[in-house]
C-alpha cells in the first residue's frame, strides 16, 4: 500500500479539492497519509503496516494511550515508561519494538544501556476504498 508523508493541512486541502470536484483521485496515489513529529531527531521513516488490520490492532486504545504518555511525559527509559503506565517491562518492550518497526516510535540511546522511547509520527491518516480491491 502506498503512503504519503505530509501535514494535516495538506491532507485536508487534498481531500477538500477532491470533494469539490477540483481534482480527481489517481488510482496510483497514496492510500495512507502520515504526519511526522518535528523534533529535530534522526531522519524519519515512513509509517508501515503489514495490513490495515495489523495497523488497527497496533493502534489500539491501549497503545494510543501509551503513545500519549511517550509524547507528554517524555520518559528517559523503557523502565521509566513501564513504571508510568503500569505495564510489564517485557510486554512493553515487545509493543515498542512493533511500534518502532511500523515507524511510529524510535528507541533512541539513553543513559548507559537504556533505550529512550520517542514518538516518531504524530498522526496517521488512512484512506480506504470500500469498493476497491486494496
Image: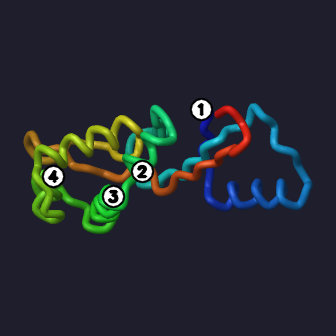
Which residue is most to the right? 22
In front of the other: 76 or 133: 133
Mark 2 and mark 4: span between their CA atoms? 19 Å
- Depth-wise, is mark 4 or mark 3 nearer the camera? 3
- Looking at marks 2 and 1 on the same chain, the residue that comes earlier in the sequence is marked by 1
Mark 4 and mark 3: span between their CA atoms? 14 Å
Label 3 crowd bin: few (<14), some (14–19), many (20+), radius 10 Å? many
Residue tagged 4: 77
Q: Which mark is residue 40?
A: 2
In front of the other: 50 or 111: 50
Residue tagged 1: 1
Residues tagged 3 and 1 counted as in contact (Cβ below 8 A): no
Residue tagged 3: 67
Which residue is most to the front? 131
Mark 2 and mark 3: span between their CA atoms? 18 Å
Secondary structure type for disc 3: helix
Q: Which mark is residue 43?
A: none
Which residue is most to the bottom? 72
Q: Which residue is found at the position 25% from the left and 50% from the top?
A: 117
- Depth-wise, is mark 2 or mark 1 nearer the camera? 1
Q: Which residue is found at the position 25% from the left and 67% from the top?
A: 73
Amino acid at each position: 500500500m502506498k503512503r504519503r508523508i505530509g501535514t494535516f493541512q495538506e491532507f485536508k486541502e487534498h481531500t477538500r479539492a477532491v470533494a469539490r470536484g477540483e481534482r480527481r483521485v489517481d488510482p496510483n496515489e497514496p492510500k495512507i497519509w502520515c504526519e511526522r513529529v518535528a523534533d529535530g531527531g534522526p531522519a524519519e521513516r515512513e509509517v508501515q503496516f503489514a495490513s490495515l488490520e495489523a495497523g488497527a490492532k497496533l493502534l489500539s486504545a491501549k497503545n494510543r494511550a501509551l503513545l500519549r504518555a511517550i509524547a507528554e511525559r517524555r520518559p528517559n527509559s523503557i523502565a521509566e515508561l513501564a513504571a508510568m503506565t503500569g505495564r510489564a517491562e517485557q510486554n512493553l518492550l515487545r509493543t515498542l519494538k512493533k511500534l518502532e518497526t511500523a515507524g511510529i516510535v524510535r528507541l533512541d540511546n539513553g543513559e548507559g544501556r537504556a533505550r529512550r522511547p520517542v514518538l516518531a509520527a504524530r498522526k496517521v491518516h488512512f484512506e480506504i476504498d470500500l469498493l476497491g480491491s486494496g
